[in-house]
Image (spheres, rainbow, N blue to C red):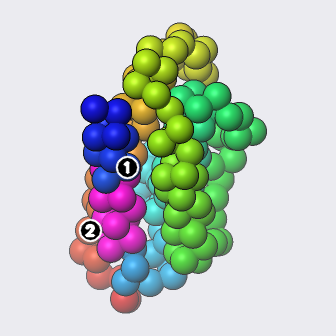
Amino acid sequence: MQEHFFADYLERLEDLQRRLHAEIQELPAEAIDWVPGEGMNSVAVLLTHTAGSLRYWIGDMALDDPSGRVRQREFQTQGLPGAELLRRLDEVFEYASSHLPRLRLEELEKEHRSQGYGVVTCGWALLHALEHSYLHLGHVQITCQLWKQSGRPD
């Protein structure tokens, strides 16, 4: 059962990775930092925040491996090419793929104190990492759609 759980989890992460790559691979450089409206984030911010969040929930919370994350900096990201942003995300996916298999199912019940959520279990942290990241995939998709509909050059 343990092999299946983590294999399934990593498959979902790979799906997320593929979808994020597909969404922005054809996006022009100027679209990466474009903000569609007040209170909204650019693709650069969304990708940086997704990478930071995934690393935090998987590494810091589930694997007890501190990252030194400064969440607020993620929302100041600009001027990085899409390829660099995807490379940073890929590093997190590689980290998860190489480190998650060392967890045992019984460790999913281990508790950690998180920033903003109080005490959470390792299992909750892993599920939240996926849930939160797929939410931001949706934000990236909508931002890309808005860019294309805005009439800006490709």
Which quadrant would the C terminus be assigned to in this image? Answer: bottom left
Between residue 60 and residue 22, name the one nearer to us.
60
Please, what is the three-letter code of the amino acid marked with disc 2? Gln
N-terminal of the two: label 2 or label 1? 1
* In magenta stretch: residue 73: no
**Picture quadrant where residue 151 is located:** bottom left
Q: Amino acid at mark 1?
A: Leu
Asked if one can make out residue 135 in the rendered structure from this viewpoint, the answer is no
Q: Residue at x 65, y 53 (%)?
A: 76
Q: Which mark is residue 10?
A: 1
Q: Quadrant of residue 60?
A: top right
Kindly report the distance in space between the C-alpha atoms of the residues bearing marks 2 and 1. 28 Å
Query: In the image, is residue 24 above or below residue 126?
Result: below
Q: Say which element carries label 1.
A: helix
- Place of residue 91 in the rendered image (x, y in percent of width and height, measured from the top left): 58, 60
Q: Is residue 90 visible?
A: yes
- Give the residue pinned by disc 2: 145
Question: What secondary structure characterizes most of the magenta part?
Answer: helix
Magenta region: 12-23
Residue extending furthest toward the right: 68
